[in-house]
């Protein structure tokens, strides 16, 4: 198994929490993120998976990034570059999308 530094989970529903993740094309979102990561040379260290409902109860698509335990809402294609560059490459949280932070002390920038 590769030594991933991050695992990105993208919720694709079906919803059990009321979020609308399942109404978005999360497979395309996943493919777009993987393409971006390849362009940036980060693909080998970031695992990207789709998942069922995560129980966020926030507007989707929901994305969770480990090991930081950062939860983002409304992750559309337009935000992927910022997530890849700022969070996955730079270790910083994309604040406008943040809905939950499981372990603030795990941020690489702190
Ligand atoms: S449908 Fe519940 S978190 Fe995505």
Image (cartoon, rainbow, N blue to C red):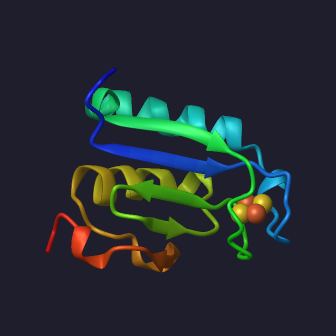
Residues 32 and 8: in front is: 8
Side of 24 where 1 appears, left or right: left
Task: Give the residue at x 64% y 67%.
Answer: 74
Q: Is residue 5 left or right of residue 12?
A: left
Position of residue 87 in the picture relative to residue 102 (left or right): left
Left or right: 21 in relation to 36: right
Q: Where is residue 49 in the image (x, y as percent from the top left)?
A: 56, 38
The location of residue 104, given as percent across then percent down, is: 30, 77
Residue 45, located in which quarter of the rendered image? top left
The residue depicted at 30 percent of the width and 35 percent of the height is 4
- The answer to which quarter of the image holds residue 37 is top left
Quadrant for ligand 1 reads bottom right
Locate the C terminus and report the quarter of the image it occupies.
Answer: bottom left
Viewer-side residue, 63 vs 33: 63
Q: In which quarter of the image is residue 105?
A: bottom left
The residue at the far top in this view is: 1
* The N terminus lies in quadrant: top left
Residue positioned 24% across, 68% down in the render: 106
Along the line of sight, the residue nearer the viewer: 98 or 81:
98
Q: Nearer the viewer, residue 16 or 32?
A: 16
Q: Residue at x 30, y 26 (%)?
A: 44
**Percent position of residue 69, x then y:** 41, 64
């Amino acid at each position: 198994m590769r030594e991933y530094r991050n695992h990105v989970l993208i919720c694709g529903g079906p919803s059990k929490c009321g979020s609308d993740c399942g109404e978005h094309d999360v497979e395309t979102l996943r493919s777009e993120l993987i393409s971006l990561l390849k362009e940036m040379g980060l693909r080998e260290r970031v695992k990207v998976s789709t998942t069922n409902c995560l129980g966020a109860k926030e507007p989707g698509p929901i994305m969770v990034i480990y090991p930081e335990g950062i939860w983002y809402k409304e992750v559309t294609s337009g935000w992927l570059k910022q997530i890849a560059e700022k969070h996955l490459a730079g270790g910083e949280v994309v604040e406008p999308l943040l809905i939950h932070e499981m372990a603030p002390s795990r941020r690489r920038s702190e």
